[in-house]
Image (cartoon, rainbow, N blue to C red):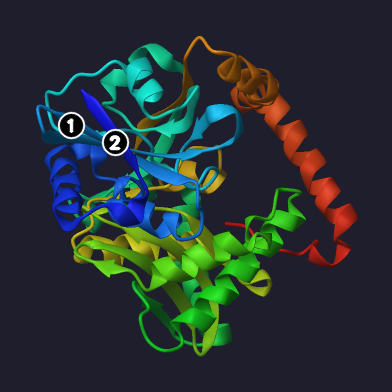
């Protein structure tokens, strides 16, 4: 095996075509975050984004996207944002993970959303987490019947939708907004999401200009089946809720959903997700992946789960040890909170109280 490390923009059309072919051939790689377009878009904002191009006997057999940080520490592309990570490779190929990490010039590679089927990293997983999904392969009506049978809130949504229409006007849903006003609508959705982060005491992703810039770039991305997808729910002329995500290979990961604070009593988040599922199924989407993490709305809407993993591939070098010392305590504490409903509830209340203390004007913020 040979590995050439390049910037995403340095990949040629033949290499990009090979990447797309590997991804299309393996269902577990059908994730927009593993598409070359995502890595190339991130590379325009994150200058340390790299791709390891794996060759065997002169043939390209894999692509390993990563970001290089201090101490030779390797991270996923767009760390903290990417909900799908791993090696995109030819079927049947085998490598040594540590040797690959060494060949990429890294002391360690850390992951927190490793997709299924990544055998090369089997020995390096330290935790697994469910990622709830809406499976639309049998059509929306089959999914919807099961969701209604399982959730009283889903059964109550038609009543809430009728009330919303009576009080604000007819409902209208747009699966993929591409008109001249899409950029402005996207900013509104991101502002709602930013307010939610602040209200709940979470780190505000959109306070970082590169993330907002990346999202706007992705909104304009239209390369083959890959594209940014801005979905909008209106009542009359009022924008009620929106979601920005990505789409490729029939998969739409839920990324940034939010709704207008004044509309909370109508369950706009659930209305939005159900409208997305209905329209996406009609447009050829097979799966909406809602992502890891415990949320009530995910339990109410899901029809199944996939599994993602976290862990690290570390070489026996000082840089890997130093990186572990800096990050392991935080990761360990987070896993302990995630595993315990009681601890999770306590942590959530503390974060929300912190958000109210810092920004009392956002007490009535938004929630996805």
Q: Residue visible at 56% across and 37% down?
A: 69
Q: Quadrant of residue 275?
A: bottom left
Residue 243 falls left or right of residue 263: left
Q: Is residue 127 visible?
A: no
Residue 131 spot, x, y in % from top left: 42, 36
Q: Is mark 1 in CB contact (under 8 Å) with mark 2?
A: yes
> Is 287 situated left or right of 151 in this image?
left
Under circle 1, the secondary element is strand
Q: Going from the N terminus, do you reach mark 1 or mark 2 first?
A: 2
Residue count near mark 2 (Cα–Cα under 10 Å), binned few <14, some 14–19, many ≥20? few
Residue occupying the point 18% across, 61% down: 284
Identify the image quadrant of residue 198: bottom right
Q: Quadrant of the C terminus?
A: bottom right
Q: Is residue 79 left or right of residue 27?
A: right
313 horizontally vs 318: left or right: left
Q: Nearer the viewer, residue 131 or 141?
A: 131
- Residue at image position (48%, 21%) is 312
Give the distance between the C-alpha atoms of the residues marked 1 and 2, in whole angstroms: 8 Å
Q: Position of residue 27 (x, y in %)?
A: 19, 38
Residue sitting at the far right: 357
Judging by the rendered image, the residue that carries numbered circle 2 is 4
- Whether residue 143 is visible, yes or no, is yes
The image shows residue 341 at horizontal and vertical percentages of 65, 27
Q: In this orientation, which residue lies closer to the viewer: 90 or 131? A: 90
Q: Nearer the viewer, residue 255 or 324?
A: 324
Q: In the figure, 306 relative to 199: above or below?
A: above
Residue at mark 1: 55
**Above/below status of 320 relative to 273:** above
Residue 44 point in image, percent of width and height: 45, 60
For numbered disc 2, what is the local secondary structure? strand
């Amino acid at each position: 095996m040979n590995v050439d490390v390049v910037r995403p923009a340095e990949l040629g059309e033949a290499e990009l075509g090979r990447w797309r072919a590997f991804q299309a051939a393996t269902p577990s790689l059908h994730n927009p975050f593993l598409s070359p377009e995502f890595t190339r878009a991130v590379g325009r904002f994150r200058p340390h984004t790299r791709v390891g191009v794996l060759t065997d006997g002169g043939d390209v057999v894999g692509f390993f996207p990563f970001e290089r940080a201090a101490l030779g520490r390797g991270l996923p592309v767009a760390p903290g944002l990417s909900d799908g990570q791993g090696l995109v490779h030819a079927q049947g190929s085998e490598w040594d993970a540590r040797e690959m990490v060494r060949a990429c010039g890294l002391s360690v590679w850390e992951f927190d959303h490793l997709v299924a089927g990544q055998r090369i990293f089997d020995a390096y997983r330290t935790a697994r987490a469910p990622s709830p999904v809406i499976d639309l392969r049998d059509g929306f009506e089959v999914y919807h019947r099961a969701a209604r049978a399982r959730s009283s809130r889903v059964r109550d949504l038609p009543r809430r939708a009728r009330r919303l229409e009576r009080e604000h006007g007819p409902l209208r849903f747009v699966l993929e907004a591409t008109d001249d006003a899409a950029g402005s609508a996207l900013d509104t959705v991101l502002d709602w999401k930013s307010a939610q982060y602040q209200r709940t005491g979470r780190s505000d992703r959109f306070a970082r200009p590169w993330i907002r810039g990346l999202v706007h770039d992705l909104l304009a991305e239209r390369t083959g089946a890959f594209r940014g997808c801005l979905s909008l729910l209106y009542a009359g002329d009022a924008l009620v809720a929106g979601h920005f995500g990505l789409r490729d290979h029939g998969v739409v990961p839920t990324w940034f959903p939010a709704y207008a604070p004044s509309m909370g009593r109508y369950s706009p988040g659930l209305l939005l997700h159900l409208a997305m599922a209905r329209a996406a199924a009609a447009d050829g989407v097979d799966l909406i992946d809602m992502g890891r993490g415990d949320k009530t709305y995910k339990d109410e809407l899901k029809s199944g789960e996939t599994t993602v993993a976290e862990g690290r591939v570390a070489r026996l070098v000082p840089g890997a040890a130093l990186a572990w010392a800096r990050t392991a305590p935080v990761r360990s504490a987070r896993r302990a909170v995630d595993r315990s409903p009681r601890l999770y509830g306590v942590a959530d209340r503390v974060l929300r109280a912190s958000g109210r203390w810092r920004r009392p004007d956002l007490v009535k913020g938004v929630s996805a």
